[in-house]
Amino acid sequence: MKGMTLIVKKTTQLIAGMIFMYGIYIIVHGHLTPGGGFAGGVIIAGSLILVTLAYGGDFLKLVKEEAGTTIVESISILMVIMIATAGFLFGIHIFFSNFLPKGVVGQLISAGVLPLYNIFVGTEVAASIFIIFLSLIIFKEESPQ
Amino acid sequence: MELAISVITGLMILGALYAIHAKDLLSSVIACGIVGYSLVICFLLLKAPDLAIVQIVVDTITLIIMVAVVLDSSREEKYSKPDTMGYVSAATGIILIFIFLWFFIASIQQLDVLGKSTLRMAGPYIEGAAYKTGSANLVTGVVFDFRGYDTMGEAVVLVTAVLGVLTILRLKGKK
């Protein structure tokens, strides 16, 4: 896949990192401000798609990237289910129970396991949307012209 | 505010109608964008910033993918003359619309006033939810604590969608 012109590349260099950081901010502050795992994950996927569209990359590199992203996605959905199962083992024995201490409402480290759910769901959503995008590119280049 | 939402909804309907009837497929895709971005403004006016963030990013990514598909295939809509099966399915669709409308009117009279049962449901969630879940953002509290099963289902659905894309769209087998 070919990249784009120099202007697009320079602009991407300037703003892609900021978009990525904004996505991380939305995920980490998901239990304090509007947003959360789904919104932040989609923003992170958007920044990755922006970099891929602007810079392109040869076929083998994209295939490698897709394999790595698949592993990240599977691990994060597994972690979500394992945290939910951990609620079954510790504290009151309920699936999805909030077994960590809740802390002070409004602080960054509070709300028990909710930030952990946010982080892992965010990673999973980002990886999923990026995989769909990458696979569309890869399968198009694989297909006979 | 109701006036603003009505105007924006009218704009959405116009955009959707144009998207159906446009000759050029690229302008049809852009008209789909009108619907999505107007929905973002509606969400902001209705005080749902969580949904607005998700909607604006997902809409942009979808537009990128759809524009890429249109540029890659053809920009002209292929028109084929309707045959007998086309008329039969159109007639079936119209009859089904009237049957569903009739059932809708019959069942809506049995229900409570709109919003009453929803508010009764939302009351216990809002009262002391910050204390119960420890989360300042009530939406996250509901999504990950009270309704944890729903969220897990959504995440698993996303994984299944990716598996489906990887399985169906692949042309060559993996070695």
Image: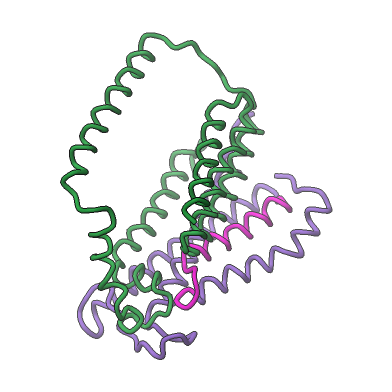
Query: Of helix, strand and loop, which mostly describes the magenta segment?
Result: helix
Looking at this view, name the residue that lies furthest to the right. Answer: A6
Residue at image position (50%, 54%) is: B42
- Tell me if residue A51 is in the magenta stretch: yes
| Residue A83 among those drawn in magenta | no
**Residue B14 screen position, x and y as percent:** 54, 35
Using the image as rendered, state which of residue A34 and residue B169 is in the foreground.
A34
- Locate residue A85 relative to residue A107 in the image: left or right: left
| Drawing shade for chain A | purple
In the rendered view, does A116 fall on the left or right side of B97? Answer: right
**Residue drawn at the location 43% of the way across and 61% of the way down:** A74
The x, y position of residue A124, in whole percent, is 46, 62
- Magenta segment boundaries in residue numbering: A30-56
Q: Quadrant of the N terminus of chain A?
A: top right
State the residue at coordinates (55%, 26%).
B21
| Residue B12 falls left or right of residue B138 | right
Tell me which corner region of the image, top left, top right, bottom left or bottom right, holds residue A97: bottom left
Image height check: is B140 above or below B92?
below
Q: Nearer the viewer, residue B73 or B130?
A: B130
The colouring scheme, among rainbow, by chain, secondary structure or one colour, is by chain
Q: Position of residue B97 (x, y in %)?
A: 30, 28
The vertical placement of A126 against A79, above or below, is: above
Q: Is residue A138 visible?
A: no
Residue drawn where x is 67% and y is 53% of the image: A52
Placement of A46 over or under B84, stated as above or below: below
